[in-house]
Image (cartoon, rainbow, N blue to C red):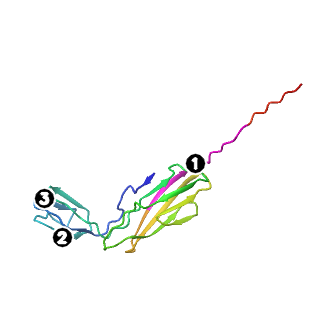
Amino acid sequence: MLMQPSILARRLEPVSVRSIDTQRMRTRLNGPPYSAIRGKSMNTTTSRALKWLGTGLLAFVLSGCLPIPIFSITPDEPEAGESVTFDASETIVSNVPADTVAVSYSWNFGDGNNGRGSSTTHTYENAGTYNIVLSVTDSAGRVGTLEENITVKAATVTTDTATTTTTVE
């Protein structure tokens, strides 16, 4: 099961816009003090979300964004006592400044236990719903956090039943 934030960017840092061909494009930026921009290219920075109207080439780079944690859980519906793997290798990290990488993955499993690393395992001893918190820190010191619940089912108990037949004479 892949856990993704319902809103990918909870807090936006400045957005760096580069390589935009606005030859046939009318561009409108969200809200004042911005206005329509026309021309062949634009290089600007704004902390507002961008809206583009018209046609043309649009290529932009988000800079200074928090890491966007994404993780999967295997198995999807674990049972108490079963080892669960948490994998955050799909986490998105902005490459601005250049060579920015994820340097730390901190897990809180919601049962008093913690883990580290992009992939880790944990065993829940009891059935229940637990709030998992993953915090990812990048090499620029920015921290992105994702919280998701996991429901752990009661362990399945299998028993062997033997039938004994007694004959009395």
What is the CA distance from the residue labelled 1 to the residue labelled 3?
Answer: 54 Å
Query: Does the magenta segment cover residue 49?
Result: no
User: Which mark identifies residue 25?
Assistant: 3
Left or right placement of residue 61 versus residue 136 in this view: left
Q: Secondary structure at mark 2?
A: loop
Left or right placement of residue 163 versus residue 25 in this view: right
Q: Secondary structure at mark 3?
A: strand
Quick one: quadrant of the C terminus?
top right
Image quadrant where residue 161 sits: top right
Label 1 vs 3, first from the N-terminus:
3
Query: From what the image shows, is residue 59 above or below residue 142?
Result: above
Q: Around disc 1, counting alpha carbons within 10 Å, would you say few (fewer than 14), some (14 to 19), or many (20 or more)? A: some
Q: Which residues make up the magenta segment?
A: 146-161
In the rendered image, which residue does mark 1 sit on?
A: 153
Q: How many marks?
A: 3
Disc 1, disc 3: CB below 8 Å? no
Residue found 36% across the figure and 57% down from its top: 7
Residue 33 image point, x, y percent: 19, 68
What is the CA distance from the residue labelled 2 to the residue labelled 1?
Answer: 53 Å
Q: Amino acid at mark 3?
A: Met
Q: Amino acid at mark 2?
A: Asn
Q: Amino acid at mark 1?
A: Lys
Left or right placement of residue 118 versus residue 123 in this view: left
Residue 69 image point, x, y percent: 41, 62
Query: From what the image shows, is residue 150 above or below residue 140?
Result: above
User: Which mark identifies residue 43?
Assistant: 2
User: Which mark identifies residue 83?
Assistant: none
Query: Does the magenta segment cover residue 158?
Result: yes
Label 2 vs 1, first from the N-terminus:
2
Q: Secondary structure at mark 1?
A: loop
